[in-house]
Image (spheres, rainbow, N blue to C red):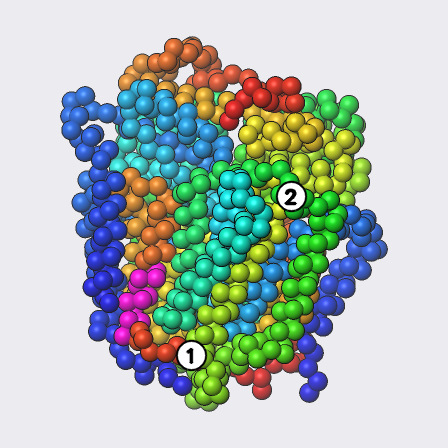
Amino acid sequence: MLTPSAMPRPALRHETVLLAVVLLEWLCFHALGPRFGTLENSFDLLRHSAEIGLLALAMTPVILTGGIDLSVGSLLGLCAVLYGKLWRDAGLDPGAAAGCTLALGALAGGLNAALIAGLRLPPLIVTLGTYSLFRGLAEAITRGADTFTNFPASFLFLGQERWLGLPSQAWLFAAVAAAVWLLVHRTTFGRACRAHGFAPEGARHAGLPAGRQLAAVYMLSGLIAALAAVIYTARLGQARADAGTGYELLAITAVVLGGTSIFGGRGTVHGTLLGVAALAILNNGLVHARQPREVAGLLTGALLLLALAAGTAPRLGTAWRARRAPHPSPS
Amino acid sequence: MIKPVLSLFLAGLVLLAGCGRAPDSARDAAGGGKRLTVALLPKSKGNAYFISCRAGAEKAARALGVDLLFDGPTDTDPAKQNEIIENWINLGVDVIAAACENREGISTALRKAQARGIKVITYDADALPDARAFFVNQATPEGIGHTLMDEAARLTNAEGEFAVILSTLTASNMQEWLKHIRARLAEKYPRMKLVAVRPCDDQKDKAQTEATTLLSAHPGLRLLMNICSPAVPGAAEAVKQAGKAVRVKVIGLGLPSENRRYVKDGVTDSVILWKTEDLGALAVEAAVALAKGTLQPGATSFRTATGATYEVKGDQILLGQPFIFNRDNIDQFNF
Amino acid sequence: MKAWPRELSVGLALAALLGALAVFAPGFFAGPPLLSLAAREAPVLLVACGAAMVIVCRQIDISSGSQFAVVSVAAGLLAAEGWPPAAVAAAALVLGTTLGALNGLLVAGLGLPSIVVTLATMVTWREGLRWWRQGAFVNLPDGLQWLGLDQTAGQWTLIAAALGLFTLLAIASRHLAAGRHLYAVGSDAEAARLAGIRPAAVTFGAFTLAGALTALAALMNVIQSPQVDPKSGTGLELKAIAAVVVGGVAIAGGRGRLAGVLLGLLLLATVAPALTHLRIEAHWEKAIQGAIILLAVAAERARGRPA
């Protein structure tokens, strides 16, 4: 069987194509909307994409291992509610509540990890279950109705103000992006993730501790989803059980648009960042082009297909091939 | 392959430029007598209620000679309304008229708009009072809750079990109405009992399934109260199929056009709504008047450009009483 | 080692749920409402069968909910134009098959990953429909509901049609060459190719069949009420996929039975009405549903059976 790395390389790297698309989008919307390119709008663009961007960053290593995490949007909702609960009802100060929320997020990610890495259940089913479970817990805790609000200004600063010239959350986002980039591209851990995505059996035979590393990836995903929840709450100034509805699909869209193979093994963090940017600019720019929001959905679909077709262009015409590494076989 | 991809995408964007440029250049060309841009935000898109509001808003915008932007979220995440408003701030619209999905969250963005010199009004569902100048009030949550509960009591002689079907548990207007329904129930109708509250995710089909289940789980049920518009025809169909049209009453908030069939068949007993087109039109009229300075805080009445007069109470412009549509009068309403 | 099949753990969960209902809420088993509920879920069975075919083939289709909505609205508009029911059904089937074939073409022809292709078609159809119709209901002409049959007969017809088709598909997937090919391609496309099977054709066929089944499901839903809601089918793809994977079809392809899918769907479709009957408040529903999915799939591991 042909492994992805053995396939003929496209003439241009996917990231280069995507960078061109992002620049092109920028130029087009700049021409269309006189206020699109202003600093104000660029900063809002950053603020609006921070949460989806964080979830996409969390999703990248997950997909690299050949897995998927459908629960991140629901976990964002659960963590937002938990944050509100800790701050308002348990009386913690905003910082301590954020710390606890992050720990709880990692714990929730740990549930995914235990089922996927521990019991070796397929990630899609497990996270489909926790997708429902986490959102359900958020609704159960608040009875659907409770809304947390009136957060102190010191906390809202994180989502609405600027620090050292940039929106405050942009710094956090940059820090997480850098950390995930280093983790994926500069550590043996990242290489092990990709090895697992390419060929789980092979990785095991090569002596890589598949279980522990898989578990770490899903816990990291939970941790980052909790961070996204805190930023989301600060940006909106409210936390409710429906926070982050549908974000998992947006994050997956950004990751695959960024060139990460859904079958694992292949992909980059900078590709994901470009994918996030391409989608964010599209959504924001179309408002400046005075187009309704449905158009953003239509163009997202088109962009996905085109970006993907570009990546596989050299293989066009060749027969369909199995490009998926076999899953762990019954032992 | 890469070239065609890029050129295709470019072509798409250029095409957009074609449609997108027109109102913009018209606005620039107008120069001194610059056309106002009114941005109208619905709670969500693809909802018959707001389509009707939009039709009224467009008529008013044409009559007043202003540009109307109508856009809203296509999904249920509460952050999306804020993002659209912040984008409009950067776009430089003159007035924003918003129907607020979540009171506290959206106020953050509306206050920011006001700080940038954009006039803000709300319609349909209010924000916090400091985040807008006026609220075009078609009915207070209290008024809606009480009207629904009183109508339910009237139809059931104020006794027996009833259930509520709403859009989602987390929608803040649903919870607000439910709060007032419960308050009225506790205060005035001790012999009635609310036995279940079920969400239908704003889908008629799901409402039909939920209503079918409710009818079999609660055989004593006397009335289904549907407080989101797709649920009314869904619940009516379930009641009709269960053959309980006589015993179980169906009421709710909805559009006459979606319920005419059931009201005439005697399945749905009454549908409560205001004139949605008038609501959209009044929102645009008030927004323009506010931007032009003809509507000032402290006014006690508001006269629209088309000659209608509305009462202003404090910072609320009142649309008037909601209508109760039933078998006798539904043919007079065509929306 | 004797394997504990997923069907057994799902069946046990279903039995436990039904047992609880029999003790605490026997009203659940009353005839007419149960018949109505079964008729409401019958279309989902067809969508789940389509999803199962695609998953057995080691692909995935998350666009079925959007296809369902597009076909429903198109069928409703044609019927409102005065087309006879047979012509409406034919047109809807052609439309659904075409939408499915388009997915198949992109996946099998261009070799694009199915989750990305169907993610793209999912948003495209959904947003396109919203742009076009703005959410307006379609009013159907009189006489289309239950195809002119009396209501009980209509409900039985729908259920019989869904179960009949399900049985045919279950037999075909086990005993017909085309069915075996699905499993062969799903377990190892390269080996299947060497055995003389054309994986691309099989994959294309699976998506096309899924599209046709979704169209049929949409029709079966449309005739149950006199109006079409363009939001219908939202989230249907997740419900179908959940039923398939809970029913024991391996997401990695090549393994699983349609009988399991039926059990999975019965379990998931019983949870929501069961909670209403057991007087459990609605805000617990999603959490309980999630917990049941997790327990059902974790149960087979309790016996130490690996993937």
Q: Out of C250 and B79, give the one closest to the viewer.
A: C250
Secondary element at image label 1: loop
Q: Which residue is mark 1?
A: A322
Residue C93 in the image, given as x and y percentages of width and height: 52, 56
Magenta segment includes A305: yes
Q: Quadrant of the N terminus of chain A?
A: bottom left
Specify few, some or many for label 2: CA neighbours under 10 Å numbering under 14, 14-19, or 20 or more: many
Q: Which residues are magenta?
A: A304-314
Q: Are marks 1 and 2 on the same chain?
A: no
Q: Which residue is mark 2?
A: C145
Residue B186 lies in quadrant: top right
Residue A112: in sight, yes or no?
no
Specify few, some or many for label 1: CA neighbours under 10 Å numbering under 14, 14-19, or 20 or more: many
Residue C187 in the image, given as x and y percentages of width and height: 52, 81
Residue B108 in the image, given as x and y percentages of width and height: 39, 36
Question: Which amino acid type is marked by label 1?
Answer: Ala
